[in-house]
């Protein structure tokens, strides 16, 4: 029974190996491969990302509110006239007997005059709000660019891992075919065949899981670039060189981060906005004045009355006390948040710098040509096992060690790029190339 199951499994693996190239060719014919480097990815992202377009429209809308805040209040026209009298509609004119005017109408033009610099304070609030929108756009850009880089380099690392699995599967499938023939001839034991088959199945499972991660990363990157489902992105790393630590001390990096980090700058603007809001609430406690020149025909002590009306609310009960108090507490809360943002920025910059330094040190400790030599040795080990020069235990041990070493190599390259991007993101500008 066990022999039948073994034969069936071997046959299934053999079919997969035979059909896999045909399946790959069919998939290739149905998809378009788009080879892009990181600069091309960023340009495509800027050209097609609808979220950025929508946010830019929002910035323009906030800038328009500055213009609105500069406008004066419209004057108000009030009028009143007699509609019906002496069995007549809209009777106006002069009595032909007494020559006295009859009919009445009243006209008044009112204009609100804002006091305590309210209009100027509203303009400042509108300008700060527009500035906040611009820095929110920069913050969105910073975060999306960081996510874009993560997806790009993660995709490159996942593809490299898939290539590694395919290479190992190619070797193990050849070995499995030969061992099956040897087993059928009675030259090797079932135990050795099963151990190699278990290694093969485990490798296939790892390749499948890595393929799922590859598909997810492809989908996420294509969504950010607004690409259709028929396109497959191939990251081009080119001659990827190791970055260098920035040639400046930590204080200089912190000053640069405070000037360029969008999240920190937004907190500064929020404090500024709350300060302006408090000043505006205090100004609202001062009453505004309404001036109203008016003309009254036949409804006053003189037939043609010209007057000037002045009105203002008396701040007896409502002096805007509640809003002023609330604005003060909101300012205190924002100032506390600002202090927290400064501490977080300092910690994030130090953490990102240490990550980059540690990953570069780890990479420097790896001997030059180590992974190339290790890969060359892998092929020799497989051949040595075929020639019975090494034992099954030694072969499996080296096989697992080789896979682990190659995975760590691709992960190390990914870690270096992510550490570089994280430090640039925290500083707010590309100080590490």
Image (cartoon, helix red, strand yellow):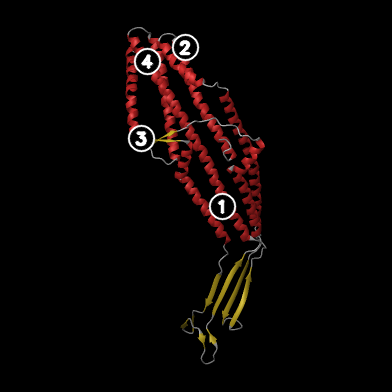
Which residue appears at 49% of the width and 46% of the height? Answer: 52
> Which residue in the structure is indicated by mark 1?
130
Asked if marks 3 and 1 touch (Cβ < 8 Å), the reply is no
Classed neighbour count for the residue bearing mark 1: other residues with Cα under 10 Å, few (<14), some (14–19), many (≥20): many
Q: Position of residue 220 (x, y in %)?
A: 45, 37
Q: CA distance from mark 1 to mark 4?
A: 67 Å
| First reached walking from the N terminus: tag 1 or tag 2 | 1
Q: Secondary structure at mark 3?
A: loop
Q: CA distance from mark 4 to mark 2?
A: 17 Å
Instruction: Report crowding for label 4: few under 14, some 14 to 19, many 20 or more residues within 10 A (C-alpha).
Output: many
Q: Nearer the viewer, mark 3 or mark 1?
A: 3
Give the vertical position of 248 relative to 307 (above or below): above
Q: Earlier in the sequence, mark 4 or mark 2?
A: 4
Name the foreground residue: 128 vs 167. Answer: 167
Q: Are marks 4 and 2 in contact (CB under 8 Å)?
A: no
| N-terminal-most mark, 3 or 4 | 3
Q: CA distance from mark 3 to mark 4?
A: 32 Å
Kindly identify which residue carries mark 3: 31
Query: Where's residue 260, x and y in %?
Result: 60, 43
Front in this rendered view, residue 395 or 126: 395
């Amino acid at each position: 029974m066990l022999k039948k199951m073994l034969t069936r499994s071997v046959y299934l693996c053999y079919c997969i190996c035979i059909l896999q190239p045909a399946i790959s060719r069919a998939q290739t014919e149905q998809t378009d491969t788009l080879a892009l480097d990181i600069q091309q990815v960023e340009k495509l992202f800027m050209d097609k990302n609808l979220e950025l377009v929508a946010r830019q429209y929002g910035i323009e809308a906030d800038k328009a509110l500055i213009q609105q805040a500069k406008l004066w209040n419209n004057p108000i026209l009030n009028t009143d006239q007699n509609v019906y009298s002496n069995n007549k509609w809209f009777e106006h004119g002069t009595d032909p007997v007494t020559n006295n005017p009859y009919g009445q109408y009243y006209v008044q033009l009112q204009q609100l005059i804002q006091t305590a610099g309210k209009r100027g304070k509203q303009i400042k609030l509108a300008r700060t709000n527009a500035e906040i929108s611009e820095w929110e756009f920069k913050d969105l850009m910073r975060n999306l660019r960081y996510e874009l880089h993560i997806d790009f380099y993660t995709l490159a690392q996942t593809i490299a891992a898939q290539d590694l699995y395919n290479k190992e599967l190619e070797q193990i499938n050849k070995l499995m075919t030969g061992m099956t023939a040897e087993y059928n001839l009675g030259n090797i034991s079932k135990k050795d065949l099963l151990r190699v088959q278990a290694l093969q199945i485990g490798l296939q499972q790892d390749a499948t899981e890595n393929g799922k991660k590859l598909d997810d990363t492809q989908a996420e990157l294509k969504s950010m670039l607004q690409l259709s489902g028929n396109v497959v992105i191939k990251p081009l790393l080119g001659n990827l060189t190791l970055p260098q630590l920035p040639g400046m001390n930590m204080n200089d990096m912190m000053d640069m981060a405070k000037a360029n980090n969008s999240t920190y700058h937004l907190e500064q603007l929020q404090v500024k906005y709350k300060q302006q809001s408090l000043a505006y609430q205090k100004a609202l406690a001062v009453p505004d004045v309404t001036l109203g020149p008016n003309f009254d025909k036949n409804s006053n002590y003189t037939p043609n009355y010209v007057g000037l009306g002045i009105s203002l609310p008396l701040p007896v009960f409502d002096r805007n006390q509640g809003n002023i108090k609330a604005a003060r507490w909101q300012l205190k809360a924002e100032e506390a948040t600002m202090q927290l943002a400064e501490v977080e920025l300092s910690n994030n910059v130090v953490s990102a710098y240490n990550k980059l330094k540690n990953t570069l040190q780890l990479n420097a400790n790896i001997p030059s040509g180590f992974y190339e030599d290790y890969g060359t040795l892998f092929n020799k080990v497989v051949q040595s096992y075929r020639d019975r020069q090494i034992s099954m235990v030694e072969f499996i041990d080296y096989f697992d060690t080789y896979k682990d070493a190659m995975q760590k190599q691709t992960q190390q390259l990914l870690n270096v790029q992510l550490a570089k991007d994280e430090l640039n993101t925290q500083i707010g500008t590309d100080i590490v190339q």
